[in-house]
Structures are given as C-alpha cells and as structure tokens.
Amino acid sequence: MFVTFGWLSAESTEYVVLNAASDALIYFLPMLLAISAAKHFKANQFTAMSIAGALVYPSIVALTQATDPLTLFGVPLVIMSYTSSVIPIIVGVWVQGHLERLLVRVLPGAVRNFMTPLLAMLLMVPLILLTIGPATTIAANALAGGITWLFGVAPWLAGAVMGGLWQVFVLFGLHWGFIPIIVQQLAGGFSVLTGPLAPAVLAQAAATLAVLIRTRNADTKKLAGPSALSGFLAGITEPAIYGVNLPRKLPFYFGIVGGAIGGALTGIAGAGTTAFVFPSLLGLPAYLSTPNLPLFFIGVALAIGISFVLTLFWGVKDDQVAGEDEPAEPVVAVTGTEVLVLSPMDGNLVPLAGIPDPLFASGVMGVGVGVEPTSGTVYAPVSGTLIVTMDSGHAYGIRTDEGVEVLVHVGIDTVNLNGAGFSPKVGKGDRVAVGDVLVEVDLDAIAAAGYSTTTVLVITNTAEQKEVVPATASAVTHDDTALIVTT
C-alpha cells in the first residue's frame, strides 16, 4: 500500500528491510512445514528442516534463472522455485520418514545415529530436485498451456477454472507455469490470464472477512482481521489461506465457488491487465482496459459476495459459533502409548549432562539418564528383543514391541577392557523380559582399571518418539522407573 500510494519507493533500503520482515515467514514456509510434517510422519525434525533449507537455499533458487540445461549427477535437472511452496516438502518428509525407518533397521547400532541423517540428506535433497521439481514443472506448463488454449475456445470456462482453482494451483506450486505466459502477453500490452485472478484472490479475502465476523474465537479474530485486510488491499492471500480458510476447509471451498463464478464472468468480459500487479482492490486500475468493464466489476462483486455470504452462514463451524447456552463439544486429548523404562541397576540416577562422556552427555545418542551403580547386576530395563550385544559385554540394545530402542551402556570407555570383569547372560537375538539379568559386572575391577562405572541408559531412536521424560528420583533400584517414553 505504501508503494502504491507513492509513500515508499520499491528501490529503497527501507522497502527491502520491511518487505523482508513481512515476507520471510511465507518465503521460508517449507522450513516451517518441515517441522509439522516431521512430527506427523515421525521423521527427524532437524533433518527435515535441513532438507527444506536446501530447497530454498539462495544458490538453488538462483538456478531457476539458468539459461543453459542443468544436470545433477549426469541426470537432466528441471529446476523450480520451492520458496513459499507447500506440497514438495510435505511429500519429501513423508518419503524421509520411510527412509529413516529403513535405515534404522539396516544400519549397525554403532553408526546409526549419525549415518541416518547423513544418508537421509544425501539421498532426499537430490531425489526431491530430480523428481518433484520436474513433475511439478511439467504439470504446471501443461496446465498453463491448456488453459491458454481454453481461453480461445471457451473464455467463460477458462475464467471459471482460473478464478476457482488459482489458489489451489498456488498451493501445489503449479502457478509458476503461468508466469512466463503472462509476462509474454504483457509484452504485447494485455494479458487475459490475469483477468480471473482478481475474483480468485478477493473471494478468498471475503471468506476470511466472513470468518472474522462470524467466529467468536478471539484468536481467530486476531488472525482473520489482518489476513483479510492484506488480501483485499495487497492481494496477499497466504496468511488468509494457510491461517484461516484452509484449516477450516469450508471457507476455502466457498472462496473457490465465488472465484469460479466471478472468473466465468471476467472471462466473458475479456478481462485482463496491462501491467503485472497483485490482483487486489488497489490493483484494479490495471484492469481498466478490459473490453466489457462493467461485466468485469460485476464478476468481482459476485465473487466477493458469494464467498462472503456462503462462509458467513455455513462456513464457520468452530464451537464458538454455537449459542452461549449450548455446551461446546468436549475436547478429547489424543495420547500415545507410554513405555516405562526401568533403571538397569541399583544405584543413583544422574542427569545425562552429568555423564563423563561428551557423546552421551551432548544428547546426540538420544535422551536418557545415567546410573551410578551400587551393585554389579545389570537388568533388562524393558521387555523386548536384543538387537545389539557387544562381545565385550559392556553394551546391550533392546527393541520393545512398541518400537522403542533402549541402549544400556555399562561404564565409560569400558570397551577397552575387552570383556574383563563382564559375565554376559544373554546374546543377540534373545528375547528378554523386564528384570531379566543381562550381565554380571565386577565394579571394583572396572574402577581399579581407571574407568568410570557410570552406566548410561538412552533411547537411541528418541526422534521417532513423541516424548521421552527422565525420572526425577535420585536413589533407585532396578524396579524403579528411569524414563517414560510416549510413542
């Protein structure tokens, strides 16, 4: 609005700074989606964010401007811009989750924790660039070409498709295929592809305005107000769509209906722009060269009115809309399965950060606790299958039926004892029940050799669990809970 009214130059430093502040969240949207997608698909969140970061990395974005053919490891690379995109990172994280679970099963326990994210990054970033990017680009170009042809055959139908589905195209990143055609048309002085965009955008803004008026949820009102304003005045609908309409579904659908009807009329009117502008109320002067201008404005007004009315009366279903005397539907908390991990030895619990081994203390191996033992019998802290047993007898990995992987590491650097002082009672592949003896340990021999007897208990696949909470007790026996894992 400041630029449109001439209060601020788009070439100024002030514009660059303020535009970055307003656009950063949407520009880097794939990184935010990576977090929620990783939670949903039980993938490593930091790996997912790294994959998303690679997709929007400046040098990758710059490849979209390359004029020469690109290749990646000898394979032709069709690049697209992943900034502000939604679907590519969601699909990518879904595949990442399956890949990580495969790697966890096949990689040895000694290298699993650092090799899994390494291989996931190494495989997923090229895979997304070589598959999702080309697929999206091919689909976008085919769609843009088809609708351009449709404008010459049935303008009303082409307008309805563009007006109704433009925001859907944006969600899937398919809108990029239209940009070169719009630019080419504008070079000739007029673009009919931009005609239905005004009803498409303003219909979604109107639906958001209806949510603002209808809902009694204070947080929704705070979000819907500025989102509707930015949609109407600036043509920026991402906050309205992602924050208000799409999560509630019906407002988004009603926006599509309004946009389609308005788009059909703008198609009949031969509407278009003479300049590249954001479709908004402030951008309407760019449409003044439309052959049938009154019909264009009627189409825009109908798009706004239809989506607003439909949403106002039928589009808001949150419990705040119900009468004050009507009880709201109860909120049911969905919780996962709790797995109690007992202390493997009698002794005193110590925080993970207090363990005299930086690998464990840093948490890179997973969330856990330490035990300063008072006796030398090591018990199975959970029931499950032994997937790791060291020949030296100092470390045991157990996978429970719920998929929780528990590591018991007796002493610090005790692998150097080559089994001296350890008398294992189990082997790899054995099925153990909680409380079964894993190994008898000569604590005095370990201490005499100069090694710490502190025993480490960690959940090595912490990233796949909803929550891992260490116990707060100090003195424990092997019957006491040391960790609570929510799967």
Image: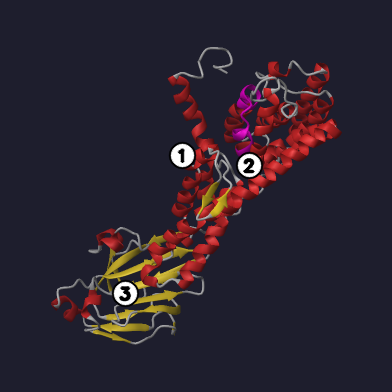
Q: For residue 183, which quarter of the picture?
A: top right
- Amino acid under disc 1: Pro
Going from N to C along the chain, the mark reached first, 3 or 1, is 1
How many neighbours does mark 1 have within 10 angstroms: few (below 14), some (14-19), or many (20 or more)?
few
Q: Residue at x 51, y 41 (%)?
A: 63
Instruction: Identify residue for label 2.
Output: 173
How many neighbours does mark 3 have within 10 angstroms: few (below 14), some (14-19), or many (20 or more)?
some
Instruction: Identify residue for label 1.
Output: 58
Please tell me whether residue 57 belongs to the stretch shown in magenta. Answer: no
* Residue 373 in picture, x, y percent from top left: 25, 74
Report the mark closest to the observer, 3 or 2: 2
**Label annotation for residue 116:** none
Left or right? Give the position of 396 relative to 466. left
- Amino acid under disc 3: Thr
**Residue 37 in the image: above or below residue 479:** above
How many neighbours does mark 2 have within 10 angstroms: few (below 14), some (14-19), or many (20 or more)?
many
Instruction: Identify residue for label 3.
Output: 477
SS of the residue under disc 2:
loop
Extent of the magenta region? 229-242
Left or right? Give the position of 394 relative to 15. left
Q: For residue 115, which quarter of the picture?
A: bottom left
* Residue 287 in picture, x, y percent from top left: 73, 19
Separation of disc 3 and disc 1 at Cα?
A: 55 Å
Separation of disc 3 and disc 2 at Cα?
A: 57 Å
